[in-house]
Image: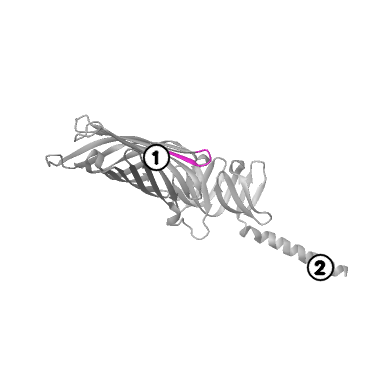
Amino acid sequence: MDLMKRIGGRTFLFFVSAAAVFAPSAAADTVKLDNGDRITGAVRKLAGGKLTIDTAYAGPIEIEWSAVSRLAGAGNFDIRTSAGRIYTGTIERTDDKLSIAGVDGAQEIDINDVSGFAAVTEKPRAAFRENVKIGFDWGYNLTRGNASLTQSALGANAQYADSKQKLSGIVTSIRSRQGNAATNRHAGDARYDRFINERLFAYGLGGVERNSRKLLALRAKLGGGFGLKLVKDKATTVSLLGGANYSRENYFPDEAGANVSANSGEGTAGIEITAVRFGGIEFASRLLVFGSSTGSGRYRFEYDGSVRLPVFKNFSYGLSFYDRYDSRPAVAVKKNDYGLISALGYTF
C-alpha cells in the first residue's frame, strides 16, 4: 500500500512538472514590475494608463502602466501613439522605450508617446475598420421674437490612420432663416498627412466652400506643405503648419449681372491644438492664415474651435465656433463671417 502511494505521488509530481514545462506556450507574455515581481499571462490591452493581463491563477488583472519596468509580448498588438500613428507587431518594453517588431519593420517609441495598445487576436495586422473613426453632428436652434430665427447644422467627419499616414475629412452644412430671408454655408475639407518621423510630416490639403452671406458661389483650394509637432503626449498635441496653396473663387453675379472671379497663389501658415482634459472633455483649435503672393496685400484666415463633452457611450455634446476673415473681399461684403454652433454628436 505504501508502495502504491509512493508510485502515485511520483506520478502526480511528473504531471505537475510536465505542465510547468509546457505552460509557457499558453502564457507567453511576461510583465516585470518596478518592485521585482513578475507576472505571466496574456496581455490584452493598455488603456487609461492601466495594463490588462489575463492570468491562469487570478483571471484578468489591471496594473498601473507606470509600475511596469519590462514587458515582453509574444502575440501581435495594435499600438497607437499620441501622434495618431498605428503600428502592428510584437512588443517589448525596456524601461522608457517600447520596441515594436512588425510588418513595417523594427520601431522604437518613447513610452510617453504610447497612448494605448490592444492584442490582435484574429489577424496579424490591424483591420481597416479599427483604424477608422467616423462621426456625425446635428444641431438646431429656434429663436422667436419680432421675427423667428431658425438655424440647422449638419456635420460629418472621418479619419483613417496607420503607422505611415493619416487621411482626414470634414463636411459641414449650416442653414439659417429669418423671416423670408435665408442664408447657407457649405464647406468640405480633406487632408492627407505622410509621417516622416514622430514629429515631422508632409501634408496635402484640398477644400471647397460656398457661402451666400459672403456672396461666395464657390471657393476651391489645393495645396500642401510640412508640419511639425511641437508638443505630443497622451493628452495634448500642438502642431505648426507651413506651405502654399492655390485658390479659385467665383462669386454670385452683382446687381448689374456681372460675374466676379479671382485666382490666387497663397502662402499658408497655421497652428493646430488638441487636448483631452477633465475626464474625457475634448478641446480642438485650428488657425490657418493665407497670404496672397500677388503683392495685393490681401490675406485671409480660417479659425475653427470646439469643445466636446461625452454624454453617453458614443454620444457627445459639442459647442463649436468658426470665423472666416478676408482683408480685401473681391465683392462688397463684410470682412468677417462667424458663427457659434451647438450640436449632438455620435462617433463610431
Of 261 and 340, which appears nearest the observer?
340
Mark 1 Cα-neighbour bin, 10 Å: few <14, some 14–19, many ≥20: some
What amino acid is at disc 1?
Answer: Ser
The earlier-in-sequence mark between 2 and 1 is 2
Q: Quadrant of the N terminus?
A: bottom right
The reply to whether residue 146 is in sight is: yes
Q: Which residues are magenta?
A: 277-283
Tag 1 secondary structure: strand
Mark 2 Cα-neighbour bin, 10 Å: few <14, some 14–19, many ≥20: few
Residue 78 left/right relative to 266: right
Of 216 and 35, which appears nearest the observer?
216
Instruction: Name, please, the residue furthest toward the front.
Output: 146
What amino acid is at disc 2?
Answer: Ile
Q: CA distance from mark 2 to mark 1?
A: 77 Å
> Can residue 282 be found in the magenta stretch?
yes
Q: Which image quadrant for residue 75?
A: bottom right
Residue 319 left/right relative to 244: right
Q: Which residue is mark 1?
A: 320
Residue 137 left/right relative to 216: right
Percent position of residue 42, x then y: 60, 55
Q: Which residue is mark 2?
A: 7
> Can residue 177 be found in the magenta stretch?
no
Counting every numbered tag in the picture gives 2
Percent position of residue 155, x then y: 36, 48
Disc 2 to disc 1: CB gap under 8 Å: no
Of 178 and 67, which appears nearest the observer?
178
The reply to whether residue 168 is in sight is: no
Instruction: Name, please, the residue furthest toward the right.
Output: 1
